[in-house]
Image (spheres, grey):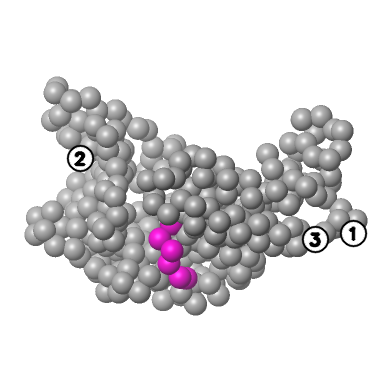
Amino acid sequence: AKRPWWVRDKLLCKTTSHDIDFVLNDISGSEFARLFHRHVSNSEKVTEQSAAKRSKHLQTASLQYRDFCIDFCHLRFEKYSPDSRVPEKTNKASPVEDAWRRDLTINSLFYNINTNQVEDWTEQGLQDLQLGMIATPAVMPLATLLEDPLRILRAIRFAAQLSFSMETSLKKAAMDSRVRQALQLKVSRDRIGNEIDLMFQTRDPCRGIQFLLETNLIDAVFIFEKSWNAEMMPSPLDVYEAGFGLLTRTQALASRIFVEASQWDESRRRYLWYSAFLKPCCDMSPSINSRGGKKSRRNGSILY
């Protein structure tokens, strides 16, 4: 079966994704990838991409084939340790169990290549896709966010990418202080930065920043430099809100100028969104306005 973004984007009639994941029910992802590589490598160039050392036990595999990045994995359920977002234990699972462990309902949809049918094992994915709703399969979203706090940033990013709303219980769970702590302890700054960068590549980053403000996670993502003096300068929240306001006005103006998606230069648009949101931070930053060198400006700064 193919899952989950390819299925979601197909149902939304969006441009076909070049990232395709195959989930397998009777063989591991790494074993199937080796068979696939052996089958096509004589006539086609296939590049293997190694899994991170911490996640090799998941037995997933990635291949670059033509213009596609293909991931292979086995149906599984996962068990997490309190101090890591990488599952410490996995086991074989049914399609139902695998779907229920997913981060979001819209990402839990399968397309069965044997029956040519979409499978919605949570019985929520298709409905949430129609409603434009970001929600977790889990009845208690807090538990799934604490297992892997990166999921809340993914939820916010997909909300911005698809112009979806966020389900009330998910937003409430994201406001729990334990999620904030887990995000800071379990997720590297690189992974956080990657999700935020993907959010700024969308046409509606304002929606993502708004959710970060509403869930009180904005300062866990955009960390102010240590030299920031809250008594002498505006509070960080005031700066974030000023950036949000400028980004909102910039996005509204740009959307009126560039109506068609084909008119956008995506790389320049991304820089425009970043510039608008971060301008108040730059204007008020003591390190930017001081005579300190480049190295000193980089220490702990939101801007670097």
Q: Are circles 3 and 2 on residues that touch, CB within 8 Å?
A: no
Magenta stretch: includes residue 283: no
The label shown at residue 65 is none
| Residue type, label 1 | Glu
Q: Residue furthest right?
A: 232
Q: Residue furthest left?
A: 115
Q: Residue furthest front?
A: 257
20, 293: nearer the viewer: 293
The label shown at residue 32 is 2
Q: Is residue 1 visible?
A: yes
Q: Residues within 10 Å of mark 1 (few under 14, many from 20)?
A: few
Q: Which circle's residue, 1 or 2, is located before the other in the chain?
A: 2
Write down the region rendered in magenta. 161-166
| Residue type, label 3 | Ser
Q: Which residue is mark 1?
A: 231
| Residue type, label 2 | Phe
Task: Kindly report which numbered mark, 1 or 2, lies closer to the viewer in this rendering.
Answer: 1
Q: Which residue is mark 3?
A: 235
Q: In the rendered view, tell whether residue 190 sits above or below residue 84.
A: above
Q: Residues within 10 Å of mark 2 (few under 14, many from 20)?
A: some
Residue in the image at 24% along x and 31% along y: 66
Q: Residues within 10 Å of mark 3 (few under 14, many from 20)?
A: few
Q: Which circle's residue, 3 or 2, is located before the other in the chain?
A: 2
Residue in the image at 80% along x and 61% along y: 235
